[in-house]
Amino acid sequence: MLNFIPPNTIDFEQLWSLISSRNKWFIKLRFIIVAGFSLFVIFTQEFFGIEFTSEQLWAYAIIAISLFVLNVGFSYMENSGLVKNSEYGFNQLHFAFNQIIIDLLAIALISYYSGGIESPFYMFFVFHMIIGSLILPGYIVYIICGIIVAYLATFSFLEYYGIVAHHSFGNLLEAPLFDNYRYILIIISSFGIMMIVSVYLANTVARSHYQRSQQLKLALNRLRDAEKIKMKYTMGIVHEIKSPLVGAQSNLDLILNGYTGEINTETSEKIKRARIRTDEAVAIINDILKISKLKLLDTLTKEDVDLVELFNETISKKESQILSMNANVKIIDDRKDKKNVMLDLPLFELVVSNLVGNAVKYNSPGGEVRIFLKNIDNDEVEIVVADDGMGIPDEDKGKMFHDFYRANNVRKKGIEGTGLGLSVVKEIIEQHDGEITFNSPSRITKEGRKGTEFIITLPNI
């Protein structure tokens, strides 16, 4: 089987997607052409008085019906999975080639039965060769181009010498042209030049565009590889920074627990603040490490996840933070279908931890956090994490999912953070074919406090 795949192909997925869409377009267009040709024959007879012979009408009918039946077969092949998106076997390029050959044969028969060199339909060869130039390798298109020109020249001279019968285009022409030697030579010469130039231009543009797209794909792959190397380097450096901080925490704990002797209240408060600051620093480092790992992941490993259990575990892990803020956290599960959802658990733990942690962190003492779960009609599950805290200023709403961005009211209050959490959350949810939006004020807002709610929609599978 001929190999039609362009050399130096990098992105096979893009190639198959492109050719598949064109094949579907061919099939739809062919149905329109069959109907249009049938109406054209009827129209020219009724309104222009063109008289076709019974042999021509039978030929037109057989060609139209055959093309329609073949097109139904093409449609079945495209939708049944018989055409493979693979380098091996019968693939989309082979399928396109076969369709083009069938169309060219149909045009050849229609041209012959509508006047041959006098036919208005032989110009459709040019249209089809341009389409073929956008899909098939150059050498294949040039071979087909040569065969078409040879076909038109051969049959024109066979008609000229009376070896095969000539079928005029009804009574359109007052005098026949098929028996004019000079006319035949001029038409065939101009037609051949038009075909070659059209194929050359179309194939050159298509090949240049394809090569450029493959070069861009290769450059993108190199950038991704460089990004992975950078991420690994960042993870190594950041992990090394974490080690002395953890050591400092251990020493501070020894002092606070009295292992180095008693300390006065003022000193104890200062050390406790230092301990909190180191906790914040370690949390930021852990966020950066998680983000780096996320950037290095190419695929998801999904499993059945119980959303209520996931949120309960997260709330349990954040118990000290919740108690320090005296926050009231509650899960409200309004789902009728409480089945598990397919998620990458480690990644989605990061989503839940970030949203719940932010709802507590950016709240006021005694604030409320509500987690709503419900089903949506189009087989999706909606997760809402709402709080009655400080809310998001209007001028910051368009930037909340940007890397390293933090709202003005958060910065003014001196609350620590990297500004990376929400951008990572958005990326993880989109990897799960989901969507995240937010509202501020939230649905549980209180007087004088705007609150924020983040709404996640996920496929309920």
Image (cartoon, rainbow, N blue to C red):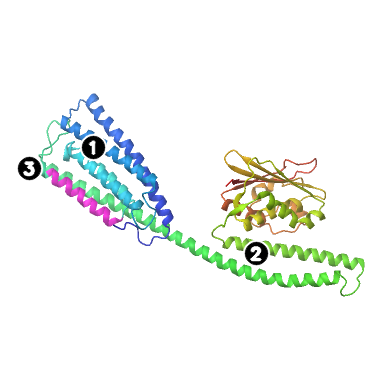
Looking at the image, which residue is at 80% across and 63% down? 276
Question: Residue 289, image x and y in percent?
Answer: 65, 64
On the image, which quarter does residue 316 sit in?
bottom right
Query: Which residue corresponds to mark 3?
Result: 161
Looking at the image, which residue is at 33% across and 36% down? 32
Residue type of the residue flagged with mark 1: Ile
Q: How many marks?
A: 3
**Which of these two is toward me, 47 or 177?**
47
In this view, 448 is above or below 15: above
Please tell me the numbered disc located at residue 63: 1
Q: Secondary structure at mark 2?
A: helix
On the image, which quarter does residue 210 sit in?
bottom left
Q: Secondary structure at mark 1?
A: helix
**Which of these two is toward me, 181 or 449?**
449
Q: CA distance from mark 3 to mark 1?
A: 26 Å
- Left or right: 3 with respect to 421? left
Secondary structure mostly taken by the magenta-highlighted segment of the chain: helix
Question: Residue 10, image x and y in percent?
Answer: 42, 60
